[in-house]
Amino acid sequence: MSEHYEIEEVISEGERKFELYRKTISLFLGPIVFLIILLTPMPFLPTEAHRLSAVLGIVLIYWVGEAIPIPVTAILGAILCVILGVAKSQTVFAPFAHPIIFLFIGSFMLAEAMKAHKLDYRIALSILSLSWVGNSYYRVFFAIAIIPAFISMWISDSATTAMMYPITLGILATVNQLSGGGRSRFEVGLLLTIAYAALIGGIGTPIGTPPNLIGIGMIDKIIGVKIPFFLWMTMAFPIMITMIFLMLIYMFSIYKPPIKEIKGLSDFIKQRRTEMGTWTRGQKNTLAAFIIAITLWILPGIVAAIFGTESNIYKLLDAHIHEEVVSLIAVLILFLTPVDWKNRKFTITWSEAVKIDWGTIILFGGGLSFGGLMFSTKLADFMGNILLKITGVDTLWGITAVAIGLAIITTEVTSNTATSNMLVPLMISVANTAGVSGIPPAIGVCLGASMAFMLPVSTPSNAIVYGSGRVPITSMIRAGIVLDIISFFVILIGLRILCPLLGLM
């Protein structure tokens, strides 16, 4: 992570103790639950399903309690599956080499290049310096939401929030000078907005946040339906824009500005842009690779919309221009385009590229493996029947509503990646048991898993702005509850309208 993203996270003593107790309790509870499930006779389950349920018992407890690093838990679960004979080693570990793993790797490395050359920072300043933004409070607030939402479509929400954090502090310093200083509700609203906008923006593309690719991968592996890059954007982007718009309306109504015009803002942004200097060769190369990747990602979808899926040109693109290949092509461009030919220095170095989040990649592989095993052992069918009886819901949109609600609640207390890994296969199995499509419930989990607005521990983005000491926990909880409710209805209504229109049924 490049230097301008390093933000020190501050937590209270009470929070530190809570985290300590949570990890300690889960560390010992996991093995106990594992042994209880494993040693309890379950004649109603196949042997492999019984053993897998014991493995999932310890895995889920460790994921929620974070007794050990979450990616390590995924490895632990895979090892236990092999040792207990749930499946052969090749079957258990094959998902760790799923094509979407390489889409993760390529897109993460592309994002790392953007951060290394501060391309995202330049884009943010360029938008803030546009004449239509000016010094207007409302336009600044709007821009502060749009910038992280757009950037978070391509890089992680935490990196986006960390990048926007110093810019926002500079804006607040200007506001405080003009308004006479002192903490205002405005600064609370502005800081919450950058975190929330980054979370919402992640749903806009498949690579915006891990739950999206987890859902796409499991829908492909379990249901056998592929969701292309452009199709996901066509479905998720309207939902993202609606959420951003409603979030802004809420923030505008609650967090009033101390002044209507931020007269010194233009000078502040101009000074920051001057400090950045002219476009560097690295920024130009990274932008070129980024544009090439986006173009190739969405091109098959555009061709299909214009010429149809039976056209020769679409079939050619569909057969050879796969999304994971595109991400790796973009990375190769970064490794091959020089920034200093004399010294043979290229746009990205291997030491920079390997800074990507390997933990998320391992976690995704583990989740994909567990999801597949749940269905191959018939454990998913059993769990689907149980949940169907508990909820009493057996319609497609009723199950989708349950999926969204569970995801929003769960993601407040555990990572969005773990939430998706746990709930996507479960909700697909519930849908299968009810005899309806598992695609809308699975997508509902993915989108709901990104709506972690309530607590600092819900996501690093929230922790960053809370760690500033300027955002009271009560303000985050109050705003988070409202936005959780709004997001539930926006996602449900959005999927109800868009999934049938786009054939995601």
Image (cartoon, helix red, strand yellow):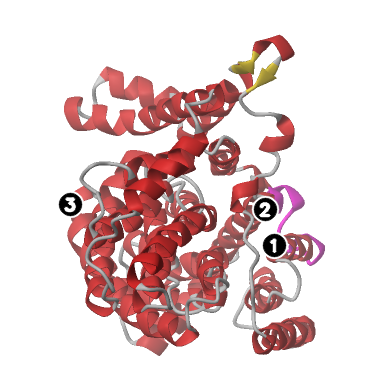
Per the image, the residue denoted by label 3 is: 501
Q: Quadrant of the C terminus?
A: bottom left
**Residue 49's image quarter?**
bottom right
Most foreground residue, 214 or 208: 208
The CA distance from mark 3 to mark 1 is 36 Å
**Residue 105: % across, % down:** 60, 40
Instruction: Kindly indicate whether the residue at mark 2 contacts the one at mark 1 (C-beta within 8 angstroms).
Output: yes
Magenta stretch containing residue 92, yes or no? yes
Mark 1: amino acid: Ala
Residue 442: assigned label: none
Q: Which residue is mark 1?
A: 74
SS state under label 2: helix
Which of disc 2 and disc 3 is earlier in sequence? 2
> In this rendering, does residue 283 appear at all?
yes
Above or below residue 311? Residue 106 is: below
Check disc 2 and give the amino acid type.
Ile
Percent from the top left, x then y, of residue 42? 66, 84
> Is residue 224 part of the magenta span, yes or no?
no
Residue most extreme to the top: 342
Residue 263 vs residue 207, the one in the foreground: 263
Question: Mark 3 Cα within 10 Å, few/some/many (few <14, many 20+)?
Answer: few
Labels 3 and 1: the sequence-earlier one: 1
Name which residue type carries label 3.
Leu
